Image: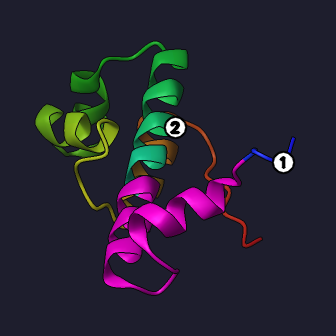
């Protein structure tokens, strides 16, 4: 059990301490990826395509695709519109 490495230690080794440019970039990209995965899972559960979601929310399929792949920095208001208008769900945000 002494050889177990904490995930935070791995992040520090690879990207540096919190607050450094490389670590901040990693944290931002990680959040974009997680938001994209959540959107994709919710969209699939709602049984609608990227095209249908884009049409409902006044965006483009390519934009939905970029979000789902974590390749787009998205504003909370846009994410909320995708979830609430596009998917008919309620977006909950908490601070932990």
Which residue is found at the position 52% from the left and 61% from the top? 11
Q: Which residues are magenta?
A: 5-31
Q: Residue 2's mark?
A: 1
Q: Give the quarter of the figure containing the N terminus.
A: top right
Q: In the rendering, at what x and y percent does residue 22 appear?
A: 32, 74
Q: Residue at x 52, y 69 (%)?
A: 12
Question: Which of the two marks, 1 or 2, is nearer to us in this view?
Answer: 1
Name above or below for residue 96 compared with residue 61: below
Which residue is labeled 2 in the image?
Answer: 38
Answer left or right for 3 relative to 72.
right
Indicate the position of residue 50 as horizontal and vertical percent values. 27, 25
The percent coordinates of residue 4 (x first, y second) are 75, 45
As drawn, is 26 to the left or to the right of 50?
Answer: right
Q: Earlier in the sequence, mark 1 or mark 2?
A: 1
Magenta includes 11?
yes
Circles 1 and 2, Cβ within 8 Å, touching? The answer is: no
Q: Is residue 44 magenta?
A: no
Which residue is painted at 53% across and 28% down in the image? 42
9 to the left or right of 42: right
How far separated are the C-alphas under marks 1 and 2? 35 Å
Q: Quadrant of residue 61?
A: top left
Q: Which mark is residue 46?
A: none
Q: Is residue 8 above or below residue 7?
A: below
């Amino acid at each position: 059990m002494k050889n177990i490495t904490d995930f935070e230690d791995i992040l520090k080794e690879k990207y540096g301490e919190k607050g450094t440019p490389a670590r901040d970039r990693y944290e931002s990209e990680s959040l974009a990826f997680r938001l994209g995965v959540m959107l994709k899972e919710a969209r699939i559960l709602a049984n609608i395509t990227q095209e249908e979601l884009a049409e409902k929310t006044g965006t483009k399929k390519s934009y939905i695709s970029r979000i789902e792949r974590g390749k787009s920095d998205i504003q909370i208001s846009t994410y909320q519109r995708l979830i609430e208008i596009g998917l008919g769900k309620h977006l909950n945000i908490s601070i932990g």
